[in-house]
Each structure stands twice: as C-alpha cells, then as structure tokens.
Image: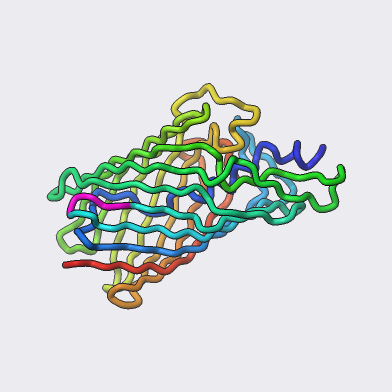
Amino acid sequence: MSYIMKYIVVTFSLLLIQINAFGQSGWAREKGGAFVQASVSTFSSKDFYSVTGNLFDQGDRFQSQALTIYGEYGITNRITGILNLPLYKSGRFSGTDRVGGIGDIRVGAKYAIFQQIPVSFAIEAEIPTGDGFNFAQVQDPIVPGERINIPVSDGEFNVWSTLAVSKSLPTGKTYGSFYGQYNIRTEGFTDQYRLGLELGQRFIDRIWLIGRLGIQESVSNEIETTVSFLYGEGTTYTTYGLTVMADLTNILKLTASFNEYAGFIADRMNVYDGATWSVGIAWELKTN
C-alpha cells in the first residue's frame, strides 16, 4: 500500500494541535488591560483512532510542533479583543520530510454579560491561511515523486461561539469556570460543539495550578468517511490537561502544560492517542 493511501485518513492531526489550550472564562479584561502569551508545543504518536473508533498502530510515527501567539486586550470594561495566531506549525511522519506554515488564525471578541457573577459570550472567526494542501516528500518512495498531504490549514472558514461562566472564592486563590462552544463550519463540513470545565488553585502566592477537562462532539452522526474527515470531520474526544503558571515578576509569567486525549466521556474518533506538551512565557498588564 502506498504512503498516500496509508496516511490519507490521518493527516488532519496537524490541524488538531491548535485546539484551544487557553481557558475560557466569564471574566473580561478591564479597559486597557492586556495578556499576551507565546508558546511552543509538540505532539508525537503512532496510535490512531479511526472515524469508527477503532485503534490502529500506524507504524510510522506522526510528529507535529507549533509556535503560537495568543492575546487579549480590554477594549472597554465589558469588551475584550481576542487573537490566536499559530505563527508556525510543522509536521512529518517518520517516513517523510517535514513541512510547515502559518496555521488558521482566530480573531474575535468577548462581551461580559454580567460582571458581578462573571458570564461572558464570545464570537471568534477562524480564518484559513491555506487551501488545505501542504505536501511532504516521501523518503524512499515506492512510486517516484510520491508525496503526502500534511496540511496546516483546513481551508475552510469557521465561526466559534462561546458562553462561559466563572466563580472565584473570596480568598482569590481558587476559581472555577464552565463553558460551552459551538463551531459553525463551512465547505460542507459538520458543525461541532465543545463543553469544558476548568479549576484553578494558587499556591505560595506565585504559582497557579490549573486543571482542565473537556469534550468535543460532532452535531451530526452522518459523517462523510472518504476525504472530508481529513480535516477534523467526525473528530470526537475527551481531553484533560494540567497547566502550571509561575509569576516571574508582576507582569511576566512562565507556563508549562500538557493535554491528553481520552475516551471516558466522549469516544476517541479520528484522533491520535497521545499528549501535547507546551511551554511558554506570558506578559500581563493590569490597569487597577
């Protein structure tokens, strides 16, 4: 079997590395306040759950890395601008060259519906940076010139809507957030929704420990099982993770995270079995 046929059902995973690792919350930035984080992430696995939920050992390992900039800015005390920019994403199989490019850009705004009990609603547009094709050369090909598509963009425009509610204890050292997201997809792809929970606890004044749990499901069970799920069509999973954020100064923070896929709430379908690890540095400006 050629490399193209062997991997045509799994190359979407480079797209999946940009799953939003930033917590969704009911809080908005105060006017003039800002938060910017630069992070690098890496993923590696050879175990793949098919669109029907069957686990396959693909033999050749899939690897992907990303450099991402995430930012928030308080336009008013109720409106926060949001930007998620994957500056560079790359991927390869152990039997191919590495290819990369700029990932899909998400830009939008969050509105604080209530501030006493923090509830927010956000709209974000996910803008494609490519046409869904990014070919890597196969090493030692069976067919001369054989290539595999390892896209960094799915080539379609998305609109994400997020409703989030948060609560902080009076000490200010413990908080929780719950959110729901709906993703309107174009180009004939199936809409998706996500639900998530985040809990944070501050230790020794300078360190936050943040745990996350979430699911993604497709709105429809009628999934096209030929080409479309290359780009996340029919992808479902449970994800959990942990982030440590340490204050280096009053405005600089160091972050380290891992996120893992599981099947104990939503089954793993059309997704690799493995963890994404990331480290980053963040800058936060508060106006009060």
Q: Residue at x 20, y 59 (%)?
A: 30
* The N terminus sits in image quarter: top right
Q: Residue at x 54, y 32 (%)?
A: 234
* Range drawn in magenta: 77-81
Q: Can you name the residue that lies furthest to the top here?
A: 222
46 sits to left or right of 287? right
Q: Is residue 268 magenta?
A: no
Q: Residue at x 72, y 50 (%)?
A: 136
266 sits to left or right of 15? left
Q: Quadrant of residue 206?
A: bottom left
43 sits to left or right of 22? right
* The C terminus sits in image quarter: bottom left
Q: Residue at x 40, y 63 (%)?
A: 37
Q: Quadrant of residue 272?
A: top right
Q: Can you name the residue that lies furthest to the left here?
A: 116
Tally the numbered discs: 0
Is residue 121 visible in the rendered image? The answer is yes
Task: Assign the magenta stretch its main secondary structure.
Answer: strand
Q: Is residue 80 magenta?
A: yes
Q: Nearer the viewer, residue 284 or 216?
A: 284
Q: Is residue 50 above or below residue 225?
A: below
Relative image position of residue 161 (x, y in whole percent): 34, 38
Relative image position of residue 23 (x, y in whole percent): 35, 52
